[in-house]
Image: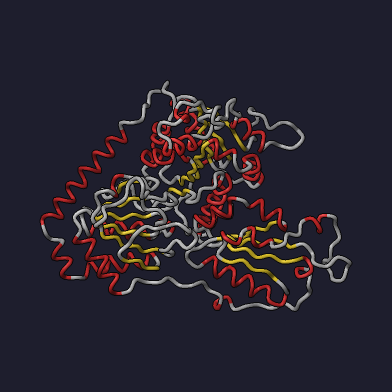
Amino acid sequence: MADGYARVTGRPQAVLVHVDVGTQALGQGVHNASVGRAPVFIFAGLCPYTESGELLGSRTEYMHWLQEAPDQKAIVRQYCRYTGEVRTGLNIKQTIGRALQFANSVPKGPVYVAGAREVLAEEIQPYSLDQGQWVPIGPSALPVDAIHDISQALVDAERPLIITGYSGRDRRNPELLVALADLVPGIRVHDTGGSDMCFPFSHVASEGFRLSFDECTKDADMIFLLDCDVPWIPSRNPPPKDAKIYHVDSDPLNQHIPVSFFPANGRWKADSFTALTQLVDYIKSDNSLTKSLQHPKYAARAEARANVHQARLASIASQPRLGDQERLDAHNIGSLLKTHLPDSTNYVIEAVTCAQILSDQLQPSRPGSWINCGGTGIGWSNGAALGVKMALADLEKGGEGQKPSLVCQIVGDGSFMCAAPSSALWVASKYEIPILTIVLNNGGWKAPRNSAELVYPTGLATSASDDEINVSFRPSPNYAALAEAAAGSEGDWENGAGNPKLWMKGVRARTVGDFKEALQQANERVAKDGKGMMLEVLM
């Protein structure tokens, strides 16, 4: 939840955990916040360090001996921007202030502070800090020569390509990328991370979202990497060896990734919004570049690109089978969501093998309308979707948001099962956080089979059953019933399907007709009545 809230607001959220076991329970959530650049402040207790009542807070229970790890901070250190310990109450605010500076400085991410009970019980005189002196590192800009080199290369290239991954986290960036693409007709923009809506799908320059594998990299003669961890898969779709490549990122060397050898002719650590503003302003104001862009070839490139984009949209539109009796798949699910849910819907996506098809059909074009994990720890969306909804609701109350937003979590059954789904559903019910959860029930994990076939295309996995390679979830749980049970009332057993006060409703859909009917209910129940709904799709 803290991760999801932070992704919407950009402000770190606090998580409190219990000593070493609570820290371990964070598990892949810390990975997701680190790789996904979500600022989260984690505070953990440490076992008391005195045994016999020497200080207030000394050990008093059996567990105080068992939960003392030799180096508790080491459990999460390699995933955190900062790890620290409060050793006296006299500088606790400075310690927390320093941790928050790291969490808020790009690349943003989790920080971890621990403190023993004796320290937390210490009595001190109240004091305060001037928060204006505890700000994070400010945004950095491109140097003058970099602005010139990148701008000139974009204009001179015959097949320029921009590859981005998470630049859309700053909601101002998509508009600037559109301005850049409009200035230089023929530019293509490819999203490889899918963690945020970085460039509108509706724009003719859009190449859509693929997880680093797309043919568009193979013919590019100039590539501009912007906030991107994995621009292509070197063994599958590398760019031409003579392509000019420039990389702008808050962490262009991927310091947390030991093996990362993507080449670049120029690499700069800079804020993406600042850099894009510089590039757009430079191209607009440079007489030589504006004169070059008046050449007829750019108009021809714009027309050709529009034709390619139109053909791609037509191909995507031809994929869904929309008859009422048709079985559901990623194509018609995405198409129906786009046509049946409000335009203001914000999608929290953890669909793994279906995500790229869903992106094609949903065609996200509004900043913030598509939020994906960016990391690889499955189960992220169960809590993140609740945090996203809470953040949007707070922004709307404060006058910063648009009209009330429906949050739709789309999650594969494998991911849904991997992060205590009943706990997330209960929390949503207890605190009345209304979202629409769509579970794509395809009976198991499909990604492991795909991964095996990439390495062994003719191996045994190609003909083995899901049970034989242990990725089957059949017989499948009834996720819709689980949702109602997890959010159930206490003691009176009246939280059944016929109870009008039921806060969480579970529905199953097998066909297009079922799905349409369920989405009509969702519009009424979630968007208007502010109640939760689980829609299980049997694929």
The quadrant holding residue 121 is: bottom right
In the image, taking residue 230 as reference, residue 70 lies left or right, namely: right
Q: How many labels does the image show?
A: 0
Kindly give the residue lying farthest to the top in the view shown: 325
Residue placed most toward the observer, 124 or 223: 223
46 vs 55: above or below: above
The quadrant holding residue 161 is: bottom left
496 vs 407: above or below: above
Residue 164: x, y in percent?
36, 55
The quadrant holding residue 496 is: top right
**Residue at image coords 54%, 68%:** 102
In the image, taking residue 149 as reference, residue 19 lies left or right, namely: right
Kindly give the residue lying farthest to the right in the view shown: 52
Q: Can residue 4 be seen in this view?
A: no
Residue placed most toward the observer, 265 or 222: 265
**Residue at image coords 44%, 53%:** 402
Residue placed most toward the observer, 23 or 389: 23
* Colour pattern: secondary structure
Residue 434: x, y in percent?
57, 43
In the image, taking residue 308 as reference, residue 194 lies left or right, namely: right
Residue placed most toward the observer, 229 or 494: 229
Residue 348: x, y in percent?
49, 46
Kindly give the residue lying farthest to the left in the view shown: 296
Residue 504: x, y in percent?
61, 37
**Residue at image coords 39%, 36%:** 339
Q: Can residue 368 be seen in this view?
A: yes
120 vs 465: above or below: below
